[in-house]
Image: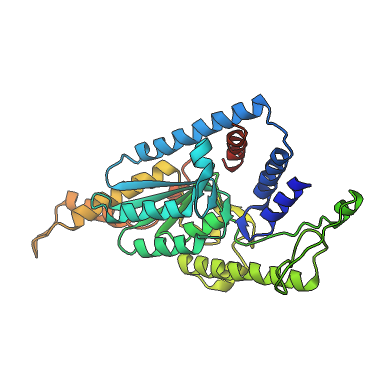
Amino acid sequence: MKKNLLVAAMLAQPWALMPEYMQSMASVVARWQAGVEASPETLAAVHADMEARQAARAQAQARAGGGSIAVINVFGVLTQRGNMMDEISGGGSCSTEQLVAQLRSAEVDDTIGQILLNFSTPGGSVYGIQEAAAEINRIKASKPIIGISNSMCASAGYWLAAQCTELYCTPGGEVGSIGVWQAHEDMSQALEEAGVKISLISAGKFKVEGNPYEPLGDEARAFMQLRTDEYYDPFAKAVAKGRGVGVDAVRNGMGQGRVLGAPAALAENMIDGIATFDEVVKKMQRAAKGSKGASAEIEPGRILSEAESEAAITTLLDSSPLSQSESQVPSRLSAMQRELEILSI
């Protein structure tokens, strides 16, 4: 019964997360709460995926060539603080507080000219997302922040990605899942069949509203819906502002809670182009070279050579988002946390 209570508590808070990921997480938490150990095969698979994730983080910066591009990986389930999975198992979640700290560090680093947010996330908790989105908007005013879905950027992850200066998606990637949800688990019948009766002693009219020991009442349901809407409203407005569209276009389009593949997302103006990670990096590198060249003084009235003219045209072309045709180039707790880590890969 305790395992059900833990799952009920997880479901009761608002999430900007793909629901199927919560189902997987809840099943693992419930099994561990029941004291069932993971098989050696499962733990071996988790360990292998953990190593792959760590390698991907290192390779992303290496492939960007270091230098003036700061690559910040946004991998796994988003949480506000306390990256417990990272500390114990090596990378199953991403703290928005740590993300903001990385962004601010890149902002004040004079050697950094551009920031690349490398997304691979199904979303996560709504807590801390609005604050992180505001930081992206603030910092991009002084340094371009480019985002890429590589290859999933869903829900709370898309909330953040939509704020980037430009946003791309890999050819086989997905973006979207714009929405917020929570759930109520009614355990009253299971408790009755088990011969268990729960008596709640509380102070405050609504203190135990929505508890799992009884069916969800109409008033409690209405409040849960209100709470969900209170997060969905700023989510939709943030996406609208970031993508330069009206709020109705977000609410009535862009998948309406579904994730969309790259071509469909491009048609819905959810992204600026379809490109691989390496293609986006190359574009950023060309833009950096172009900005350096543009800063050089040209003598008034001087006629540019053919090579200089071609370079100027290339700079102008590179400064615009990738076109659709261009971008379509083909102890026990620690074990529990290691197993949870595989779910967000």
Q: What residue is rendered at 36% in x and 58% in y?
A: 320
Q: What residue is rendered at 45% in x and 36% in y?
A: 56
Left or right of 142 on screen, residue 174: right
> Percent from the top left, x then y, of residue 119?
48, 48
Q: Is residue 150 above or below residue 294?
A: above
Q: Is residue 48 above or below residue 130?
A: above
Q: Of residues 285 and 206, which is closer to you in this image? A: 206
Q: Using the rendered view, name the quadrant where residue 218 is placed.
A: bottom right
Left or right of 66 on screen, residue 239: right
Left or right of 276 on screen, residue 125: right
Q: Of residues 5 and 158, which is closer to you in this image? A: 5
Q: Using the rendered view, name the quadrant where residue 332 is placed.
A: top right
> Percent from the top left, x then y, of residue 229?
63, 70
On the question of residue 140 being in view, the answer is no
On the question of residue 302 being in view, the answer is yes
Q: What residue is rendered at 47% in x and 69% in y?
A: 241
Q: Is residue 223 above or below residue 70?
A: below
**Image quadrant occupied by the C terminus:** top right
> Percent from the top left, x then y, of residue 254?
59, 62
Q: What residue is rendered at 46% in x and 35% in y?
A: 54
> Percent from the top left, x then y, of residue 242?
46, 65
